[in-house]
Image: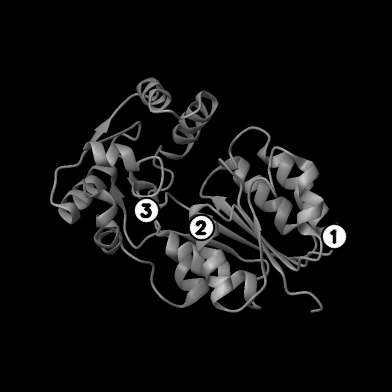
Amino acid sequence: MTNNTTLVLGSNGKTGRRVVERLEAMGLDVRKGSRPAFDWEDDSTWAPIVRDVHAVYITYYPDLAFPGALDRIRTFTEIAVAAGVRRLVLLSGRNEELAQEAEQVVLGAGVEATVVRCSWFMQNFDEGWLLEPVLSGTIALPAGEVTEPFVDVEDIADVATAALTQDGHAGKVYELTGPRLISFAEAAAQISAATGREVAYVSVTPEEFAAGAIAAGVPEDEAHGLNALFAEVLDGRNENLADGVRQALGRPARDFTEYAKQAAPAWKV
């Protein structure tokens, strides 16, 4: 290869910043794709950032299930391949119809491509929009009693980094989950155990969730988009395990209990 630069889109995000850290620790040249240098809402930023890039880690904010995401992924992929990018790794959502359409766009781009398909991030509880509810003592979600195979973002970053830097991952769809299914109530209980204080899960209606999210400062369109996403994926379709972490890395996925112990300092008030 004459060019070894790797572009990481969403380089400030949960997975993106971890991928950047791993690539830099390997001594590789990393280009960070975040605002204002890269903006999914401004396609004039796309061609300049893929110039002289070999590989791209593609993450879409807020989610591939949101309106307009598929068209943007398609156009960005075309621009990247035309610019000479030879390797693409897409972060995708598990059992999301629109996300899987985006996967096919990337896998069919005519270059080495890998899909990292994930379930609910464990780190949503300590780094994302659920941190404040955890700190308040009440996690309110329209999830009922559904169970999730929560996946650790550290595992996602390890798989994405391997796909970006190693041969043998082209054409693969790695479906990543944690090693067991747990409910949101059980997740709250494990957070309680790790912190020594009571954190409860409360099942709410979609309308109640949207109102609470908006009141907490989430933009209205994003709150409603999350509601639509939850209605799609929190219906039991993900109540099964996959072994993508082991397929890609040869080791088991990290468990929620281990995650909760390490994340506990973020939940101390």
Residue for badge 1: 83
Query: At numbered mark 1, what does the secondary structure look like: helix, strand or loop?
Result: loop
What's the distance in space between the residues labelled 2 and 1, CA to CA?
25 Å
What's the distance in space between the residues labelled 2 and 3, CA to CA?
12 Å
> Within 10 Å of the Cα at label 3, are there few (<14), some (14-19), or many (20+) other Cα atoms?
many
Which quarter of the image is occupied by the C terminus? top left
> Within 10 Å of the Cα at label 1, are there few (<14), some (14-19), or many (20+) other Cα atoms?
some
Residue type at the position of mark 3: Met
Numbered circle sitting on residue 135:
none
Question: In the rendered image of this protein, does residue 87 appear above or below residue 186?
Answer: below
Q: Is residue 243 visible?
A: no
Numbered circle sitting on residue 15:
2
Q: Answer with left or right where residue 223 lies relative to residue 31.
A: left
- Residue 135, image x and y in percent? 25, 41
Residue 217's quadrant in the figure?
top left
Residue for badge 3: 122
What's the distance in space between the residues labelled 1 and 3, CA to CA?
35 Å
Q: Answer with left or right where residue 87 lies relative to residue 24.
A: right
Query: At numbered mark 3, what does the secondary structure look like: helix, strand or loop?
Result: helix
- Residue 167, image x and y in percent? 66, 78
Viewer-nearest of discs 1 and 3: 1
